[in-house]
């Protein structure tokens, strides 16, 4: 049984920063990608960032490139999303997820197998 628990969300002013954490427990082997997605009210769930487990290669949505950084701490079995220069349009529920298969696009949320419960990020003055 895999459990992913996000934390670190909250209310921040435009231009501010937050760091989201995703603590993993249970089956953490056979992970191919670990990703962060977000969903704003009335909108589709969208890709934010991903990291390939084997070599640490990272991938970002154009909307967050240069502002967000995905990382991992294998010793703590925790993954992070550092978010800087936040904008109101970054407001959403943020989810961490794991993709255990090689096939399928890392950008497509339906390809991911395990999900956290989500953490709310609100960017507002």
Image (tube, rainbow, N blue to C red):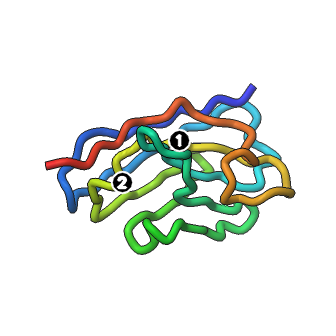
Callout 1 touching callout 2 (CB < 8 Å): no
As drawn, 120 above or below 60: above
Q: Residue at x 71, y 68 (%)?
A: 55
The image shows residue 112 at horizontal and vertical percentages of 72, 45
Name which of mark 1 and mark 2 comes first in the sequence. 2
Disc 1 residue crowd, few under 14, some 14–19, many 20+, Cα 10 Å: many
Nearest the viewer among 26 and 34 is 34
Circle 1 sits on which residue?
A: 95
Task: Describe the element under mark 1 as helix, strand or loop.
Answer: strand
The image shows residue 91 at horizontal and vertical percentages of 34, 47
Q: Quadrant of residue 40?
A: top left
Task: Describe the element under mark 2 as helix, strand or loop.
Answer: helix
Left/right placement of residue 48 relative to residue 74 reads left
Disc 2 residue crowd, few under 14, some 14–19, many 20+, Cα 10 Å: many
Structural distance between the alpha carbons of marks 1 and 2: 13 Å
Q: Residue at x 40, y 44 (%)?
A: 92
Left/right placement of residue 7 relative to residue 13 reads right
Residue at the limit of the structure toward the top, as seen here: 1
Left/right placement of residue 18 relative to residue 65 reads left
Q: Quadrant of residue 10?
A: top left
Q: Which mark is residue 90?
A: 2
Q: Residue at x 36, y 54 (%)?
A: 90
As drawn, 113 above or below 107: above
Q: Nearer the viewer, mark 1 or mark 2?
A: 2
The image shows residue 27 at horizontal and vertical percentages of 76, 35
């Amino acid at each position: 049984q895999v459990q992913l628990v996000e934390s670190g969300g909250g209310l921040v002013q435009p231009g501010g920063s937050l760091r989201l954490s995703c603590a993993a427990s249970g089956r953490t082997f056979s992970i191919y990608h670990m990703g962060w997605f977000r969903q704003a009210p009335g909108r589709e769930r969208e890709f934010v960032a991903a990291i390939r487990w084997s070599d640490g290669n990272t991938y970002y949505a154009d909307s967050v490139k240069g502002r967000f950084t995905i990382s991992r701490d294998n010793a703590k079995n925790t993954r992070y999303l550092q978010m800087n220069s936040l904008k109101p349009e970054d407001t959403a529920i943020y989810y961490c997820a794991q993709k255990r298969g090689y096939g399928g696009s890392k950008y497509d949320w339906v390809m991911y197998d395990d999900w956290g419960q989500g953490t709310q990020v609100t960017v507002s003055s």
